[in-house]
Image (cartoon, rainbow, N blue to C red):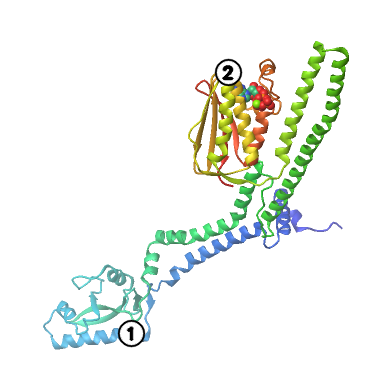
């Protein structure tokens, strides 16, 4: 016989899927998982707020209550006292009797006729309300306010007329005014609940997102190429810890892959040097045997080109592979010599190199790599300038930007990013004369990445301008 299953009848497919999903989440979620933490926090907070909102009015003892026997006693005593006054002063009006009540120092008597019309000249708004709410002498009531207690009514007869007697007297214990005030103003109660819950929620949210923020900072650094960034130790055994572990593994994997690739490139370049040397040797022997020919000269030129390319590739991989320490150096100490050399070199080509007065601010640098980055850019500027090369330095709280501009042919806007690619040159014809390998800017970019800085090119005011941005700290 087919087994009867309740779920087959009542649960729609969609709902079943939802239940299975929920089941898989909860079964996978250990007690200190992010899921359980967020779930329980919200649950607890909603529970707390609902409990406060529901229980608040219960704290209000200003509601009408049935009188106790001692309250009835008090009412009778007040009535008798008024009765005695009435007998003592038979001609006095009822208003005079109330005003001259011997207990007037601490209590106040109020009288109404049988229709609830107040005899007293004046009565507080709250007492008027109490008189309206409690109008039967058979079931006298009591209302406790912050400072006063209202009681009544009992029947009081005077000059053949019947009145209802109420009185107010100071409280034995004072209730908290704030509570009453809050109960009277539900919006203020809501506002207070919001104000109280805001810091709790903020602390909770801060606590839950703190490890995420730490991870985000690390991810940001990794995205900038800082693969050696230390991961924060997150020991929550929740989803964030697992995410941090996975990220750490991912970075390790990336680092290994990159290192292997760079090592391969470096090894290939290195290995290519030996056949190249032998080629140079064979070339020299050929020249000796057959004399200098146009073709041999061409072979010699291209061989030299390959050799200098290999040197640059090896330089590039050295920057990428070498683990080095940053040094704290004064800017003027670091740049002065570099700029003096550049000035000299520019003058050799009949060009003018200018730079500003150098500041003494300190900066954290890998001196050799920073030197190579700036030098490569200056070399280009001197090479491609028509007459002038000018350096500008802007120092902000966190960065130092060295901008090197030169007149001469501009770089097309579409090529401003490409020129940083290895072996990329704008036009073969143009660069053949200048004899570059197309690696200078790639080396500069790698050196800047190593610093956690950046390099970019712009055409400003008919000049090519290269900016090198170094972080001052870190
Ligand atoms: N200041 C500049 N003005 C005009 N073009 C430039 C400037 N700097 C770089 N370029 C262009 O960007 C290309 C790449 O520059 P990069 O320094 O990488 O190579 P290179 O100067 O040709 O060779 P290498 O620096 O390896 O000797 C250059 O070939 C050139 O076309
Ligand atoms: Mg160059």
Q: Residue furthest left?
A: 91
Residue 135: horizontal and vertical position, in percent?
31, 73
SS of the residue under disc 1: helix
Q: Which residue is mark 2?
A: 409
Furthest toward the front, the residue is 288
Q: Residue furthest top?
A: 294
Q: How many residues crowd mark 2 within 10 Å: few (<14), some (14–19), many (20+)? A: few
> Which element carries disc 2, helix, strand or loop?
loop
Q: Is residue 313 visible?
A: yes
Tell me, yes or no, whether the two marked residues, 1 and 2, touch with CB atoms within 8 Å.
no
Question: Is residue 418 something that shows in the picture?
Answer: no
Residue 117, position as x, y percentages in the image = 23, 70
- How far from the left and from the top, in percent, is residue 260? 79, 40
Hey, which quadrant is residue 152 in on the image? bottom left
| Beta carbon at label 2 within 8 Å of ligand 1 | yes
Nearer to us: label 1 or label 2: 2
Q: Is residue 414 left or right of residue 283?
A: left
Query: In this picture, is 314 found above or below 254?
Result: above
Nearer the observer, 331 or 348:
348
Give the farthest residue toward the right: 289
Q: Which mark is residue 72?
A: 1
- Closer to the N terminus: mark 1 or mark 2? 1
- The quadrant in which the N terminus is found is bottom right
In the rendered view, tell whether residue 184 sits above or below residue 225: below
Vertical position of residue 78 compared to residue 271: above or below: below
Q: Residue at x 59, y 28 (%)?
A: 378
Say which quarter of the image contains residue 137: bottom left
């Amino acid at each position: 016989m087919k087994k009867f299953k309740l779920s087959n009848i009542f649960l729609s497919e969609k709902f079943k899927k939802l239940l299975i999903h929920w089941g898989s989440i909860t079964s996978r979620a250990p007690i200190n998982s992010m899921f359980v933490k967020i779930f329980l926090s919200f649950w607890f907070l909603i529970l707390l707020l609902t409990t406060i909102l529901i229980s608040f009015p219960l704290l209000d003892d200003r509601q009408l209550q049935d009188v106790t026997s001692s309250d009835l006693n008090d009412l009778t005593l007040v009535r008798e006292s008024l009765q005695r006054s009435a007998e003592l002063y038979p001609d006095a009006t009822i208003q005079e009797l109330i005003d001259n009540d011997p207990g007037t120092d601490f209590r106040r008597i109020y009288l109404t006729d049988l229709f609830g019309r107040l005899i007293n000249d004046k009565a507080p708004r709250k007492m008027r309300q109490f008189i309206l709410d409690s109008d039967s002498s058979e079931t006298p009531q009591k209302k406790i306010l912050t400072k006063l207690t209202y009681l009544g009514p009992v029947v009081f007869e005077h000059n053949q007329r019947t009145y209802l007697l109420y009185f107010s007297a100071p409280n034995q214990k004072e209730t908290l005014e704030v509570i009453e005030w809050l109960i009277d103003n539900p919006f203020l109660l809501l506002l207070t609940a919001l104000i109280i819950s805001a810091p709790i929620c903020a602390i909770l949210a801060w606590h839950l997102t703190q490890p995420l923020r730490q991870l985000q900072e690390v991810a940001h650094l990794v995205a900038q190429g800082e693969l050696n960034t230390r991961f924060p130790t997150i020991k929550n055994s929740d989803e964030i810890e697992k995410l941090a572990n996975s990220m750490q593994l991912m970075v390790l994997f990336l680092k290994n892959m990159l290192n292997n690739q760079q090592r391969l490139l470096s090894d290939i370049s290195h290995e290519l040097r030996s056949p190249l040397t032998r080629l140079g040797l064979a070339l020299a022997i050929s020249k000796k045997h057959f004399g200098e020919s146009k073709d041999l000269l061409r072979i010699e030129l291209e061989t030299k080109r390959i050799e200098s390319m290999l040197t640059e590739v090896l330089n590039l991989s050295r920057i990428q592979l070498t683990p080095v320490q940053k040094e704290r150096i004064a800017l003027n100490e670091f740049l002065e010599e570099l700029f003096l050399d550049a000035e000299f070199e520019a003058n050799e080509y009949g060009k003018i190199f200018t730079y500003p007065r150098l500041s003494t601010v300190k900066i954290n640098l890998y001196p050799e790599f920073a030197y190579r980055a700036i030098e490569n850019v200056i070399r280009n500027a001197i090479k491609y300038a028509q007459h002038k090369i000018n350096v500008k330095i802007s120092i902000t709280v966190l960065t130092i930007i060295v901008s090197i501009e030169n007149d001469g042919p501009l770089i097309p806007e579409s090529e401003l990013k490409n020129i940083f690619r290895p072996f990329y040159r704008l036009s073969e014809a143009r660069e053949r004369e200048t004899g570059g390998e197309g690696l200078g800017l790639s080396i500069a970019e790698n050196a800047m990445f190593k610093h956690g800085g950046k390099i970019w090119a712009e055409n400003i005011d008919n000049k090519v301008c290269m900016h090198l941005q170094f972080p001052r700290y870190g």
